[in-house]
Image: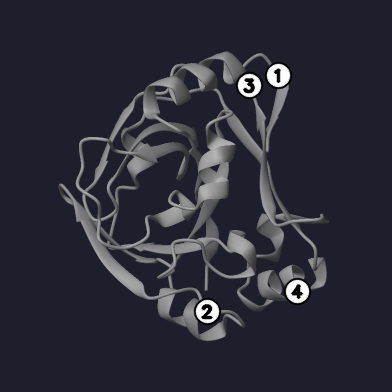
């Protein structure tokens, strides 16, 4: 089983103001992305390395309500209040070559596996029914693409590097157990914290670092 970080997701109250904030924080303009009709969201995307990208995600005001909780907790009042203050990490996604195997190994419920497509690309992805997921929402989504090329292959190099994903939780042992069981312990650092949360350490093209939390 091969598991790697596919992308990390930063939420925003709206896409335009979020892109302006990310420009201020990272010194880079995030290119336009696309829309997720099933979830009522849209995004901007930026490659961080081959096979990996950073996603800026927001509720699409032009899309109808999806009839289910949007992913990454975007409908949760506390998350919406946090994003009103500026962009913040809302999730991360791990690419695997054995999605069914990961689901079987996980000690927590990852949510149903959904088949999705956009344009010529299709994939399968775990999406929690409540839009948040286990362990307070710090559990990653797991994705299996149906074939190459990876979306990052069509993105211009940005010079931005994702150096670390940090998972924060009141029960770090439970998080560590989950990461080990699903074969992704090497992909994230675990820290004790009063409440569940994520942080992304990013190195900008000029060599300086920014921590999004």
Q: Residue at x 35, y 73 (%)?
A: 113
Q: Residue under circle 2?
A: 109
Residue 55 visible within the image = yes
Residue 42 position by quadrant? top left
Q: Mark 3 or mark 2: which is in front?
A: 2
* Of pointers 2 and 1, the one earlier in the residue sequence: 2
Q: Mark 3 or mark 4: which is in front?
A: 4
Numbered tag placed on residue 174 in the rendering:
4
Residue 38 percent across, percent down from the top left: 24, 56
Residue occupying the far bottom of the picture: 104
Mark 3–mark 1 CB contact (< 8 Å): yes
Residue 5 percent across, percent down from the top left: 54, 53
Front one among 191 and 131? 131
How many residues crowd around disc 3 within 10 Å: few (fewer than 14), some, or many (20 or more)? some
Numbered tag placed on residue 207 in the rendering:
1
Q: Residue at x 29, y 61 (%)?
A: 123
Mark 2–mark 1 CB contact (< 8 Å): no
**As drawn, is 142 to the left or to the right of 115?**
right
Front one among 151 and 132? 132
Q: Residue at x 54, y 22 (%)?
A: 159
Numbered tag placed on residue 136 in the rendering:
none
Q: Mark 4 or mark 1: which is in front?
A: 4
Mark 2–mark 4 CB contact (< 8 Å): no
**As drawn, is 76 to the left or to the right of 145?**
right
* Of pointers 4 and 1, the one earlier in the residue sequence: 4
Front one among 26 and 18? 18
Give the quadrant of the C terminus: top right
Residue 45 percent across, percent down from the top left: 39, 33
């Amino acid at each position: 089983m091969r598991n790697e970080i596919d992308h990390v997701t930063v939420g925003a109250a709206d896409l335009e103001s979020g892109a302006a904030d990310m420009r201020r924080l990272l010194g880079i303009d995030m290119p336009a992305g696309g829309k997720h009709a099933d979830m009522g969201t849209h995004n901007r995307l930026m490659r961080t390395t081959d096979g990996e990208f950073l996603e800026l995600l927001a509720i699409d005001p032009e899309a109808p309500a999806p009839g289910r909780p949007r992913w990454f907790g975007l409908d949760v009042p506390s998350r919406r209040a946090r994003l009103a203050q500026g962009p913040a990490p809302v999730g991360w996604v791990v690419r695997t070559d054995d999605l069914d195997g990961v689901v079987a190994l996980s000690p927590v419920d990852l949510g149903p596996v959904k088949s999705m497509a956009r344009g010529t690309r299709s994939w399968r992805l775990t999406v929690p029914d409540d839009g948040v997921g286990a362990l307070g929402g710090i559990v990653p989504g797991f994705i299996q693409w149906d074939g190459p090329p990876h979306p990052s292959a069509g993105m211009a190099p940005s010079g931005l590097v994702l150096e670390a994903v940090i998972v924060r939780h009141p029960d770090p042992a439970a998080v560590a157990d989950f990461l080990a069981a699903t074969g992704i312990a090497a992909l994230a650092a675990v820290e004790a914290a009063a409440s569940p949360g994520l942080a992304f350490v990013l190195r900008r093209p000029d060599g300086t670092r920014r921590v999004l939390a």
